[in-house]
Image (cartoon, rainbow, N blue to C red):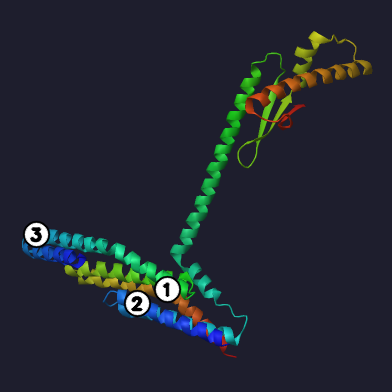
Amino acid sequence: MIAYLEAWIRNIVVILLLTSFVELLLPESELEKYTRVVLGLFIVIAILNPILNLFNNNYNFQHITDLLTVEEESSMSKSEIMKRGKKLRNISHQEARNNYKRQLNRQITALLSFDEELPERSVKVNLDSNNKIKKIIIELHNKRVDKSQFDQEIRVDDIEIGNETQKRNSKSNQKSFSKVSSKIKKQLANFYNLNYEQIVVKRD
Amino acid sequence: MEIIKIVGLGLIATILTILIREEEPEIALQLSLVVGILIFALMLSKVVAIIDLLRDLALKAEIDLVYLDTILKVIGIAYIAEFGAAISRDAGEGIIASKIEFAGKVLIMVLGIPIMLAIMESIMQLMP
């Protein structure tokens, strides 16, 4: 209780000192009266605060602070400005990220296009939160795999469309796919300094 | 000695304005405006020191800085309104000067109203 009173009295003294100091700063004009009233209100708050706390324990004087911050136009607009700035930064960040993704995409496509044996493909790049390459997903389009790769290696009977042919076809497909995919993986991993797991080669 | 500098500036400006006023009152007004701003700018670094001190005191007393900001805003409004009103009055425009002061009063009241409302509400809560 004594400590409580001590804090209260100390607070009042400091606030009185502060306001009297501030009053010295005030310009002498008709406005003086008005500023004095506002300063007086602060002293009232300082005196009233502990009494209110004493009478009802759950009383929270914080809401005056809230009131002040909400009602004030300028501080509202300041937070608004901050919010907008954050949003804008996010947008530009996203923009840069997308741009980087696009560029990477183009680069990978260009890289892979050196190898004429590779089938037609589409490239997708995943970035992590630090804008580093997380995963590169390369989708090979099946049709071209068949045409360019297989026809040279294994002759498939095109005329017969039976179960057996399909099976064989898919088997050989599998084999060459793994070959192609390891080739792509090696190339990209070397170029971007990535792990093999970070590069995924898929078929559609 | 900073005060000598400032008083010297003020005196020179005063003499110049008196000399000029007869022939070109507009330029005299501009001169006094510029000197007023100049003196204020010279004092600005000192004002910053005072505000820092106030902040320190407020932090020590564990007063919310929102209160201090409001106080500083009130002082700022008072000063700026004063400055504008004095210049208008100097130029012989008493009506504009009084309107500037009126605006200053209203703005200070607007800053004070939330505090007053909060105090009223708290006192009402005290009553059973």
Would you say B4 lies left or right of B55 here?
Answer: left
Q: Residue at label 1? A: B57
- Of the image marks 3 and 1, the number of the one nearer the N terminus: 3
Q: Position of residue A153 (x, y in %)?
A: 81, 10
The amino acid type found where label 2 is placed reads Phe
Tell me the crowding category of disc 1: few under 14, some 14 to 19, or many 20 or more residues within 10 angstroms, Cα based.
some
Name which residue type carries label 3: Glu
For disc 1, the chain is B
Tell me whether circle 2 and circle 1 mark residues in contact (CB < 8 Å): yes
Using the image, name the chain to which the residue with label 2 belongs: A
Look at the image and tell me whether residue A51 can be seen: no
Residue lying at 55% horizontally and 44% vertically, measured from the top left: A91
- Neighbours of disc 2 within 10 Å: few (<14), some (14-19), many (20+): few
In this rendering, is residue A32 above or below A115?
Answer: below
Under mark 1, the amino acid is: Leu
Drawn side of residue A133 relative to residue B73, left or right: right
Residue pictured at 11% horizontal, 62% vertical? B25
Q: Are marks 3 and 1 on the same chain?
A: yes
Disc 3 vs disc 1: which is toward the camera? 1
> What residue is shown with label 2?
A21
Q: Do marks 2 and 1 share a chain?
A: no
Residue linked to disc 3? B24
Q: Quadrant of residue B100?
A: bottom left
- Which chain does tag 3 point to? B
Task: Tell me the distance, in whole angstroms, between the alpha carbons under discs 2 and 1.
Answer: 11 Å
Task: Please indicate, yes or no, whether residue A76 appears anywhere in the rendered image.
Answer: yes
Mark 2 residue element: helix
